[in-house]
């Protein structure tokens, strides 16, 4: 089962599938600033410490390459 906007610790993830222990994050431009990248690194490290794998995709990739993003997620 996939959960949308699941709370894990102090974070709200975009999508989470418990059976695969995968978080899928869809990132807007704020994630590509220096502060955003640092916050994401801390967040990803925390999730990784729980055994959760984080897959990140830019919103533009989802909009322009939806099928490729889906295939990448499926392979994970």
Image: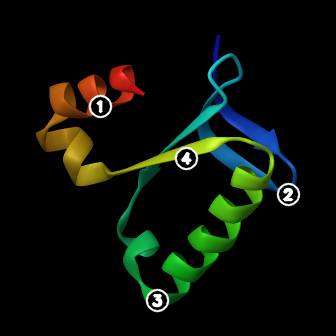
Relative height, residue 29 to residue 35 (above, below): above
Q: Residue furthest bottom?
A: 34
State the CA–CA distance, disc 4 to disc 2: 16 Å
Q: Quadrant of residue 67?
A: top left
Q: How many marks?
A: 4
Q: Quadrant of residue 42?
A: bottom right
56 or 5, which lies in front?
56
Report the mark closest to the observer, 3 or 4. 4
Name the residue that disc number 3 marks: 34
Relative height, residue 65 to residue 47 (above, below): above
Return the disc, 3 or 2, that comes first in the chain's sequence: 2
Q: Is residue 15 left or right of residue 49?
A: left
Residue ID at (63%, 60%)? 44
Q: Residue furthest top?
A: 1
Q: Is residue 58 left or right of residue 35?
A: left
Return the disc, 2 or 1, that comes first in the chain's sequence: 2
Residue ID at (42%, 84%)? 33
Mark 3 Cα within 10 Å, few/some/many (few <14, many 20+)?
few
State the CA–CA distance, disc 1 to disc 3: 26 Å
**Image mark for residue 10:** 2
The reply to whether the C-beta atoms of the residues labelled 3 and 4 are less than 8 Å apart is no
SS at mark 4? strand
Name the residue that disc number 4 marks: 54
Q: Position of residue 31 (x, y in %)?
A: 45, 70
The reply to whether the C-beta atoms of the residues labelled 4 and 1 are less than 8 Å apart is no
Return the disc, 4 or 2, that comes first in the chain's sequence: 2
Q: Residue furthest left?
A: 64
Name the residue that disc number 1 marks: 72
SS at mark 2? loop
Return the disc, 1 or 3, that comes first in the chain's sequence: 3
State the CA–CA distance, disc 2 to disc 1: 27 Å
SS at mark 3? helix
């Amino acid at each position: 089962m996939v959960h949308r906007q699941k709370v894990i610790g102090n974070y709200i993830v975009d999508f989470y599938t418990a059976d695969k222990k995968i978080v899928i994050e869809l990132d807007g431009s704020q994630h590509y600033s220096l502060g955003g990248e640092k916050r994401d690194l801390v967040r990803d490290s925390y999730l990784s410490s729980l055994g959760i794998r984080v897959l990140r995709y830019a919103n533009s990739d989802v909009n322009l390459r939806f099928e490729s993003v889906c295939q990448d997620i499926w392979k994970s």
